[in-house]
Image (spheres, rainbow, N blue to C red):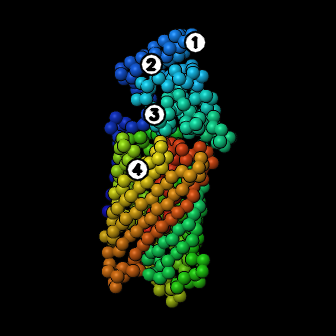
Amino acid sequence: MARTLPLVLLVFIATITRSDSLFGQRPRTLGFTPAHEKLLDDARARLQARLRSDGISSEGSEGDVVGAGVIGSRVKQVAYQTEPYFEEIEPMAPMEVHGEGFEGGCVGSCGGCAPCGDHCGPLGGPIGHCGPGGCGFNSCDCGECLPCCFPRLFDCRTFEVFWGTQGFTGPVNQGGTGSFGFHEGVNFSSRIPNLFCGECGFQVGVRGVHSNFSGSNLTDDSRNQVFVTAGAFRRVDWGLQTGLVVDYLRENWYLDADLLQLRGEASWGLHCEGELGFLFRVGLNDQTVAINPNLQQATITPTDVYALFYRHRFLPCGQGEGRIYAGFSGQSDGLLGADFRMPLTHSLGLEGGFTYLTPDEPTNQGGTQNESWNIFLGLVWQPGCPQSDARNYYRPLFRVADNGSFLVDLQ
């Protein structure tokens, strides 16, 4: 019964997130208030008066300059050609938009991004700009991005290649030598077009982990693991954000096992670049395996985990992200962990973190054998315009599972 509660909770949350007035706000339409209209009128009047006073002609009708309650392409052109005039229009600041952009398409097509979809006003830029430095989600006008030659379903800006190093131990190590080695993998996500008006994304990824190259006290064989993660999520700027994935672990060492777990989280996005949330991991199966040459058998199973976390975005435009969490396991063990991610270059990022599960048993009563920890450090490469596109609604919400997010128990 306890294992079904998190699933019921996530199903309930996924249902109520359709109420955008309360749960999970995303700026898909401008939704101008009378105050916004007044700001636009004032800005338009000031711009036209300044242009006339300096003898600069504004071609076209008034609607070409500012029309339909948004900044038109003409204003964007003037902004680039006569920057001093545009800088004085301070009232535009309250309408800055973070995220994927507007459903109806970008203002002025963001300088010709239409073939792969438009992206307006991300990362604190003025409405009408196409991503940071002209590089937005599904935007073709990106000088350093890969060509938009992929199908719509595959967006290179949400595709990640990662590699690094890690050290870990757990009950499978039976209190002996820990495991140290390297990992590599890929993680991909995209929009689900027809689910909840396209506001949800899906992700799928795989990670290979290789360790114990010189063997251990248990076997002379090296240790190889494969993790696969797949699921769905919904990101928001503020309010309720949720996600749910299924993780698969293939363990190949002195024992062979195939395990599944359900991993999810629900958080409340705050206006101050932070999130408060709840995460869980629940095992879906167990397996009986031989644990020594004498064919002694034991049961290996995923460890159920429940924790509270706080996630915070840092660096300009929220390009960096860090999280701390604390909780307990289904066996009343204590849990503590943290992880982070930050950009190094335009398309290369650094990530790292740790997980520590302190056993409920004393040291002389199995505590040493049941202690689990994982620490990792690695690089993430994204071939699109990714490391600065931190508010992309459809970038992966979950990291591919590893020995920190997929803990196991041996009984």
As helix, strand or loop, the secondary structure at mark 3 comes to loop
The numbered mark, 4 or 1, whose residue comes first in the sequence reads 1
Quarter of the image with the C terminus in it: bottom left
Identify residue type, mark 1.
Ile
The numbered mark, 1 or 2, whose residue comes first in the sequence reads 2
Q: Which residue lies furthest to the bottom in this view?
A: 294
Percent across and percent down for residue 206 are 57, 59
Identify residue type, mark 2.
Ala
Residue labelled with disc 4: 312
Give the CA separation, mark 1 to mark 2.
17 Å
Asked if the residue at tag 3 contacts the one at tag 1, i.e. Cβ–Cβ closer than 8 Å, the answer is no
The numbered mark, 3 or 4, whose residue comes first in the sequence reads 3
Nearest the viewer among 50 and 249 is 50
Q: Nearer the viewer, mark 3 or mark 2?
A: 2
Residue labelled with disc 1: 56
> Seen in the image, is 51 located left or right of residue 335?
right
Residue labelled with disc 3: 97
**Are there few (<14), some (14-19), or many (20+) residues within 10 Å of tag 1?**
few
Q: Which of marks 1 and 3 is in front?
A: 1
Q: Nearer the viewer, mark 4 or mark 2?
A: 2
Residue labelled with disc 2: 43
As helix, strand or loop, the secondary structure at mark 1 comes to loop
Percent across and percent down for residue 153 are 59, 43
Identify residue type, mark 3.
Val
As helix, strand or loop, the secondary structure at mark 2 comes to helix
